[in-house]
Image (cartoon, rainbow, N blue to C red):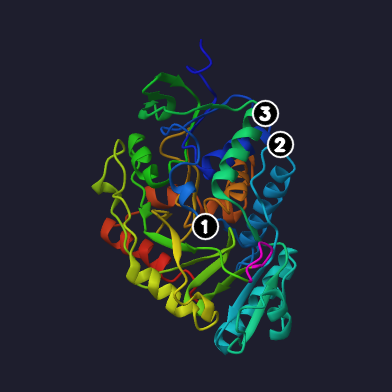
Amino acid sequence: MSRFSQAEYVIIGGGAVGLGCAYALAGAGKTDVLLVERAPDVGQATTSQGAGLCGQVRDAAERIKLAMHSVSVFRELQKSEVKPDWHEVGSLRIALSERRAEEFRRLVKAAADAGLEADLIDNAEARNRWPLLDFSKAASVLWCPSDGWMTPRSVAASYEHACRQMGVRIATSTIVEQITVKNGRVIGVKTSRGLIECKYAVNAAGAHAYHVAKLAGLELPIVPVRHEYYITVPMNGLPADLPCFRVPELTLYGRVRDGGLLLGGWEPSSVHLDPRTYALSGSPKTVEADWRVLDGFEESFAQLFPGAKGAEKNFVGKGWPTFTPDGRFIIGESCRVKGFVMAGGCNAHGISGSGGIGKLLVESLFDRHPSAYVKSLSPDRFTETFWAWETARLQAARVYETYYGV
């Protein structure tokens, strides 16, 4: 048989998540992995639209350790010939209320329990780290020195290079048309280039993960939600080594990008799609820049950085990251269709969490006693229970809208 017609693992989707899964499978000793991507190159869909921040501070130890693993993967890749453009500049999280400051104290304790360095710093130290920000309104500032940012397209290219080095085969310009199931088990993936016989089909198809699951007869609530950010022209006083920042009360995040300000945020009233309204062969509708929303980000951030007001914008990043009703990834093998494995519904953590998602996938498949956390991510939680699409869609949108909720 040809090298294309057979594989033990077929990964569907060549974004950061699919590549992170391929990297983890190869790292676990799996030598027969084939990744297929319908675009002419990897990292061209949702991955290309990401802002590239990677934060590790979370409210639970297992989520912190997951993010820490992603950082360790980016560090590994940064040593390779094709780098992910990883910059470990640290991050500042700024609280504007006592309620949020109390949350920061809990987050610092959770970080310590997980072995992540994170500290509360005073406003003077915060100002030293980001001189142009006004910290006079800050009730608390949380500093994590090992956070950072990467360039999403570079992450994809770095994963691709590393995966090929480890023997992963990658087929671009290849459209998945059908998943072949026999006696309740995946036996192949039919593509525009022919049938691939396989034991496992891994669904890492991003905004098309719903449609790929349907090919296997599974209904999963994977909801695309619009997300936007902008980048200004270069501005004075923004060196590349300034930390990333997050201002939860303003639902804003940002960093320096090419000498300018990258600023994004979470909308309290989201725009989202029902994935049933477009086909696997199509695409979600094009996101048009919503200047009312983007100008609102600018107006809010000007409270802390007056220089943001009126700065010329030369790029708008926009796309459809996917969310789930409970805000958790969907990872693992289906009990209903053996060999069909999910790696989707990443709740805007696809790029930054790609290394950790790969680790979770490996644990779900090969660990005889996976953790309770890994079990909680199973697609079975949706296929073996009743849920209604309209409710699920609104719940997934709500996860986006309350992203920085206390």
**Amino acid type of the residue that numbered disc 3 sits on in the rendered structure:** Gln
Q: Nearer the viewer, residue 48 or 133?
A: 133
Q: Main secondary structure of the magenta part?
A: loop
Residue named by callout 1: 51
Specify which label sits upstream in the sequence, 2 or 1.
Answer: 1
Q: Compared with residue 188, is residue 28 higher up or lower down, i.e. above or below?
A: below
Secondary structure under tag 2 reads loop
Residue at 58% of width from left, 56% of height from top? Answer: 373
Q: Which residues are magenta?
A: 237-243
Is the Cβ of the residue at disc 2 closer than 8 Å to that at disc 1?
Answer: no
Question: Does residue 39 show up?
Answer: yes
Residue named by callout 2: 81
Residue at 51% of width from left, 52% of height from top? Answer: 377
Q: CA distance from mark 3 to mark 1?
A: 27 Å
Q: Compared with residue 85, is residue 388 higher up or lower down, i.e. above or below?
A: below
Q: Is residue 205 magenta?
A: no
Specify which label sits upstream in the sequence, 2 or 3.
Answer: 2
Q: x%, y% of residue 391? A: 29, 62
